[in-house]
């Protein structure tokens, strides 16, 4: 029983390898004559990007961190108190608990999604506040704020995020109530 199985495996390997071999060219490359009358080939490539295009700007002019800078240098800032300036792209979790219960649903934990600007590639979530605090602080989508908090991988009620999360302590001068 073992010998036919080994023979079958060897045969299938042989056929697989022979099917993967490329055919040799019909005419060897050396037989094509070079026409000395033709001009040399011209390659028109775009200019390479400047080195600054590959640099991650860590901080803003006001010494607050940029979202991209925080994510780009995450090992330097992880589990540290930071101040990040970002534009609020989305406010999530603004939900009426009574209506949600009537529909058999639960309200998601409130969180914000921030970026450096509307066209930025990187974004991160800001967590650890209540909807009442957000209303009191008058936070609006599309506006820029300084978010103070602890940069961490996970927070209560949230899964781990590749970009990390900001556990909020204050937005500008509005401190998140403790408790």
Image (cartoon, grey):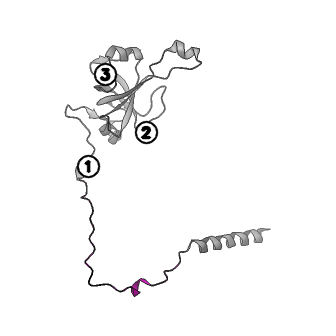
Q: Residue lying at the far right in this picture: please name it.
A: 1
- Quadrant hosting residue 91: top left
Res. 53 mark? 1
Q: Measuring from the top left, give residue 8's x and y in whole percent.
A: 72, 70
Image location of residue 73, percent across then percent down: 32, 41
- The reply to whether the magenta stretch includes residue 39 is yes
- Spatial CA distance of label 2 from label 3 is 23 Å
* Mark 1 and mark 2 residues within 8 Å of each other at the beta carbon: no
The residue at the point 34 percent across, 25 percent down is: 141
Name the quarter where the C terminus is drawn: top left
Q: Indicate which disc, 2 or 3, sits on the residue closer to the N terminus.
A: 2
Which residues are drawn in magenta?
A: 23-49
Left or right: residue 33 versus residue 104 is left
Q: Is residue 82 visible?
A: no
Quick check: 28 above or below 129?
below
Q: Label 1, secondary structure: give it.
A: helix
Rendered position, 68 above or below 2: above
Q: Quadrant of residue 19?
A: bottom right
Q: Which residue is mark 3?
A: 171
Q: Residue at x 42, y 34 (%)?
A: 153
Q: Which SS class for mark 2?
A: loop
Q: On the image, numbered disc 2 is attached to which residue? A: 162
Tell me the distance, in whole angstroms, between the alpha carbons under discs 3 and 1.
31 Å
* Residue 88 locus on image (x, y percent): 34, 27
Identity of the residue drawn at 21% across and 32% down: 63
Mark 3 vs mark 1: which is more N-terminal? 1
């Amino acid at each position: 029983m073992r010998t036919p199985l080994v023979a079958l495996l060897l045969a299938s390997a042989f056929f697989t390898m022979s099917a993967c071999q490329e055919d040799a060219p019909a005419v060897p490359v050396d037989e094509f004559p070079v026409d000395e009358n033709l001009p040399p080939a011209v390659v028109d490539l775009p200019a390479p990007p400047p080195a600054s295009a590959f640099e991650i700007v860590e901080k803003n002019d006001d010494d607050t961190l940029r979202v991209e800078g925080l994510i780009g240098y995450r090992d330097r800032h992880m589990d540290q108190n930071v101040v990040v300036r970002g534009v609020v792209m989305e406010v999530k979790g603004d939900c009426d608990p009574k209506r949600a219960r009537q529909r058999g649903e639960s309200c998601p934990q409130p969180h914000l999604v921030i970026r450096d600007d509307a066209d930025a590639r990187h974004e991160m979530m800001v967590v650890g506040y209540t909807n009442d605090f957000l209303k009191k602080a008058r936070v609006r989508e599309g506006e820029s704020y300084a978010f103070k908090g602890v940069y961490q991988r996970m927070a209560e009620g949230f899964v781990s995020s590749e970009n990390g999360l900001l556990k909020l302590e204050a937005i500008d001068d509005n401190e998140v109530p403790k408790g």
